[in-house]
Image (cartoon, helix red, strand yellow):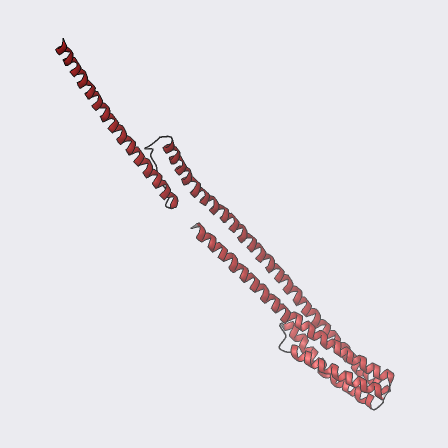
């Protein structure tokens, strides 16, 4: 029963450990998918939108077809990166109503801002740099600032969700560690109890067997022996008990036969004495 309980406890520890690790793994995966990845996507959108804005300003400052061509090339790459990152995030990567609300506003802002950037590029291609600057300052800058504000809110919202998830995972980790420590402590305690019981179960019968052997060696035969075990030690004690009984019977039989021999010798001596008396009378 003790071994069965110990095995059951070990199974419980293993099952609980597996459950805890699986749960933590799922939490980490969910944290990455629902918070870390959105942060990366949204941050990428902001970085490339700022890059587009910077390229437009640089083309206006340099005021040359070559600068415009380079800006147009860089803006095309940034726009492709924005579209890719945003498609990976919106709408399937959203995990909360608040996040969806912000993402919807960001999406609307992007749909307004990107065409406005194209209008600035059109003016730059026409080498109308002053008009391009004026249009950007009047129309594009405010929309770009609005987009950055929305992205900042989305990043803050995802960061807050990530922080809450980390705290929850930390609490779960502490609970798992506490339960594991309790189960391990219970296992150690149970091991000590089982070891103590096993030690007593072995040493007590062995002491009894040693006592029987000592009595036999001292000639104390026929001592009562009570056997209360059901294992190999019982067989040893039974053998010692049988040896004691046989030795006792042998000694008793020897004593009985010795008594009979003594009685016979006394009878012989009596007869011899009687014959001696008769012979003495005849001689006289």
Q: Quadrant of residue 33?
A: bottom right
The answer to whether residue 241 is left or right of residue 181 is: left
Residue reaching furthest bottom?
A: 126
Image coordinates for residue 173, horizontal then vertical, percent: 60, 59
Q: Give the quadrant of residue 259.
A: top left
**Is 77 displayed left or right of 180 in the figure?**
right
Residue 120 vertical position relative to residue 259 in the rendered view, above or below: below
Q: Nearer the viewer, residue 77 or 50?
A: 77
Q: Position of residue 140 (x, y in %)?
A: 79, 82
Residue 143, position as x, y percentages in the image:
76, 80
Q: Nearer the viewer, residue 56 or 269?
A: 269
Of residues 252 and 131, the one nearer the viewer is 252
The residue that appears at 33% across and 37% down in the rendered structure is: 243
Relative side of 283 to 209, left or right = left
- Answer whether residue 113 is visible to the viewer in this image: no
The residue positioned farthest toward the front in the image shown: 283
């Amino acid at each position: 029963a003790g071994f069965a309980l110990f095995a059951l406890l070990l199974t419980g520890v293993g099952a609980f450990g597996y459950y805890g690790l699986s749960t933590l793994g799922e939490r980490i995966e969910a944290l990455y998918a629902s918070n870390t990845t959105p942060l990366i996507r949204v941050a990428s959108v902001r970085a490339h939108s700022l890059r587009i804005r910077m390229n437009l300003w640089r083309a206006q400052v340099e005021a040359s077809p070559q600068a415009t061509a380079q800006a147009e090339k860089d803006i095309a790459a940034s726009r492709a990166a924005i579209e890719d990152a945003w498609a990976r995030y919106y709408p399937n990567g959203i995990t909360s109503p608040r996040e969806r609300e912000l993402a919807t506003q960001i999406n609307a802002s992007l749909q307004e801002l990107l065409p406005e950037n194209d209008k600035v590029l059109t003016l730059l291609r026409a080498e109308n740099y002053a008009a391009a600057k004026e249009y950007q300052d009047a129309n594009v800058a405010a929309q770009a600032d609005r987009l950055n504000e929305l992205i900042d809110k989305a990043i803050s919202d995802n960061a807050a969700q990530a922080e809450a998830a980390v705290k929850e995972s930390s609490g779960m980790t502490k609970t798992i560690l506490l339960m594991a420590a309790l189960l391990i402590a219970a296992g150690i305690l149970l091991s000590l109890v089982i070891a103590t019981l096993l030690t007593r179960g072995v040493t007590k019968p062995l002491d009894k067997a040693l006592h029987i052997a000592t009595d036999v060696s001292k000639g104390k035969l026929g001592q009562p022996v009570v056997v209360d075990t059901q294992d190999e030690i019982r067989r040893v004690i039974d053998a010692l008990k049988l040896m004691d009984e046989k030795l006792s019977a042998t000694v008793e039989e020897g004593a009985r036969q010795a008594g009979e021999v003594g009685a016979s010798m006394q009878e012989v001596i009596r007869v011899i004495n009687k014959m001696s008396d008769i012979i003495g009378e005849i001689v006289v």
